Image (cartoon, rainbow, N blue to C red):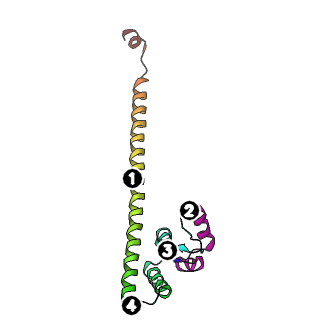
């Protein structure tokens, strides 16, 4: 898992350090014992608010400078795979969110239909009858 400092995260994702600290406190971002935060969590939370190409390039550059000197092609491929994996996980999380919202909408629709049926039934039961109608049935 790739990690960066809170200052770097703040600059890369255009969010304040206070926002990052608040998300760490909520448990939405993981922070290791060295004070570094997970890039994966940051992309999941803040990836949609920034220019994705610029963010990916900045993260790739950052990971390339902090990685041990190895062949640059191998590093680039690994970074691209990692970024794609992060994007897939982000999309899966978004799909899960949309499925939950759809379930909520369906439940709300069923509840509203039930309420409508109740109103129609109540309305039919309260018909006013005249004197002859009451006497005959």
Name the residue carrying label 1.
102
Count numbered badges in the picture.
4
The residue located at (42%, 15%) in the rendering is 130
Say which of marks 2 and 4 sits in front: 4
Secondary structure found at label 3:
helix
Say which of marks 1 and 2 sits in front: 2
Name the image quarter holding the C terminus.
top left
Q: Earlier in the sequence, mark 1 or mark 3?
A: 3
Secondary structure found at label 2:
loop
Q: CA distance from mark 3 to mark 4?
A: 22 Å
Q: Is residue 78 above or below residue 22?
A: below
Q: Magenta residues?
A: 4-26
Q: Earlier in the sequence, mark 2 or mark 4?
A: 2
Name the residue carrying label 4.
71
The residue located at (41%, 53%) in the rendering is 100
Q: Earlier in the sequence, mark 1 or mark 2?
A: 2
Q: Is residue 8 magenta?
A: yes
Q: Is residue 96 above or below residue 44?
A: above
């Amino acid at each position: 898992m790739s990690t960066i400092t809170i200052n770097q995260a703040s600059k890369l994702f255009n969010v304040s350090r206070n926002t990052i600290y608040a998300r760490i406190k909520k448990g939405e971002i993981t922070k290791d014992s060295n004070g570094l935060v997970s890039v994966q969590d940051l992309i999941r939370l803040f990836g949609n608010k920034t220019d994705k190409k610029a963010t990916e390039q900045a993260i790739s550059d950052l990971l390339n400078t902090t990685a041990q000197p190895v062949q640059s092609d191998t590093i680039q491929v690994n970074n691209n795979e990692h970024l794609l994996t992060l994007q897939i996980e982000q999309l899966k999380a978004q799909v899960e969110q949309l499925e939950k919202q759809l379930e909520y909408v369906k439940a709300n629709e069923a509840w509203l239909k039930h309420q409508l049926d109740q109103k129609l039934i109540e309305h039919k039961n309260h018909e006013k009858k005249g004197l002859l109608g009451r006497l005959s049935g």
